[in-house]
Amino acid sequence: MSVIPLPYRLLALAALGLTLVGFGWVKGAGHVQAQWDTAVQQQALQATAVREEQAQATVEVITEYVDRVRVVREKGDTIIKEVPVYVPVQADAACTINRGFVRLHDAAAAGALPEPARDADAAAADIALSTVAATVATNYQTCHETAEQLRALQTWVREMASTTQ
């Protein structure tokens, strides 16, 4: 019959079973680690691709913004240069703006309530109409530049959002 006694056979079977479980454990851990490493590598590649897309989108938005602001600035400078044509010296002599108007205009531009008018406002030197026209044109130029900056920022935010999806 059997040369090896039963307790030793059972012990050998248990050892063989433990060996098989240990071997499976090690092989399974290696397989999971390989899957993990592959997933990490894919995520790193995806992150790099997203960063490249974002950098390219940023360059495009900045280029468009700079071009648009340059056009706005050129138009504004042209308008400011034309002030003497549209507000000639005769108009400056015929119509001046008092300090009360300037104070009211500045308060409105700042979004604040104006200070009360004073007697000194009436006695102060008046401001030439051409100066007011040039100042208003400069303010509008700045406003249009800021609007272009906001549009560029909105475009950039949309581009960043689309690259991460």
Image: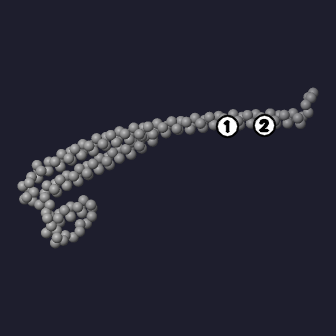
Q: Is residue 10 above or below residue 83?
A: above
- Residue at position x 15%, y 67% from top? 124
| In-image side of 37 versus 101 (left or right) | right
Q: Is residue 54 above or below residue 92?
A: above
Location of residue 38 in the rendering, given as x and y in whole percent from the top left corner: 58, 35
- How many numbered tags mark residues here? 2
The residue positioned farthest toward the top in the image shown? 1
| In-image side of 67 versus 132 (left or right) | right
State the residue in front, 10 or 46: 46
User: Residue 88, labelled with which disc?
Assistant: none
The residue positioned farthest toward the bottom in the image shown? 119
User: Residue 29, labelled with which disc?
Assistant: 1
Location of residue 110 in the rendering, given as x and y in whole percent from the top left corner: 27, 61
Q: Amino acid at mark 2?
A: Leu
- Residue at position x 21%, y 52% from top? 138
| In-image side of 130 versus 10 (left or right) | left
- Residue at position x 21%, y 70% from top? 116
Residue assigned mark 2 = 18
Q: Is residue 52 above or below residue 97?
A: above
Location of residue 56 in the rendering, given as x and y in whole percent from the top left corner: 39, 38
- Secondary structure found at label 2: helix
Categorize mark 1 by other alpha carbons within 10 Å: few (<14), some (14-19), many (20+). few
- For the residues labelled 1 and 2, the Cα–Cα distance comes to 16 Å
- Residue at position x 76%, y 34% from top? 20
| In-image side of 19 versus 88 (left or right) | right
Location of residue 98 in the rendering, given as x and y in whole percent from the top left corner: 14, 64
Q: Quadrant of the N terminus?
A: top right
Q: Quadrant of residue 16 in the image?
A: top right
Q: Amino acid at mark 1?
A: Ala
- Mark 1 / mark 2, whichever is N-terminal: 2
Q: Quadrant of the C terminus?
A: top left
Mark 1 vs 2: CB contact within 8 A: no
